[in-house]
Image (cartoon, rainbow, N blue to C red):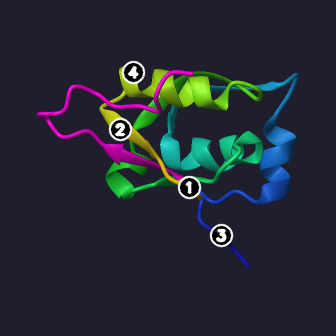
Amino acid sequence: MTRAADAITPAEARKAWKDGHLEYLRIPLKIVIPSVNVHSTKPIVLADDAVGNLLFSGTVFEDQVTDWLRALTIALPIVVIEGDDRIVICLRKSNESGGAIPPK
């Protein structure tokens, strides 16, 4: 059985964390998010393929996922919307000045 190149199993996601962080260089969010979800208090979902294809370069620390999401809204043209049961990442509309999870 084969699987899509961008698919990752939960076991693979847990193994990816080394020394409490993950590092990426120009990796699509659709690859990054499954690994980050292992340490998120709520599942993070991508609104659509356009968001999933955005490239991310940087480090994610396992105990700073909320801070990472906040920073991601500065680095990428996205909005992060936190609901009761999940966190959704959407493309930012051109008339939006940025949006994120509210500061702590």
Crowding near pointer 3: few (<14 within 10 Å), some, many (20+)? Answer: few
Dot 1 corresponds to which residue? Answer: 84
Which residue type carries mark 3? Arg
Q: CA distance from mark 2 to mark 1?
A: 16 Å
| Front of the two marks 3 and 1 | 1
The numbered mark, 2 or 1, whose residue comes first in the sequence reads 2
Q: CA distance from mark 4 to mark 2?
A: 11 Å
| Front of the two marks 2 and 1 | 1
Quick one: SS at disc 3?
loop
Which disc, if any, is residue 79?
2
Which residue type carries mark 1? Asp
Which residues make up the magenta segment? 87-104
Dot 3 corresponds to which residue? Answer: 3
Q: CA distance from mark 2 to mark 3?
A: 30 Å
Dot 4 corresponds to which residue? Answer: 75
Verify whether residue 6 appears in magenta: no
Verify whether residue 90 appears in magenta: yes
Crowding near pointer 1: few (<14 within 10 Å), some, many (20+)? Answer: few
The numbered mark, 3 or 4, whose residue comes first in the sequence reads 3
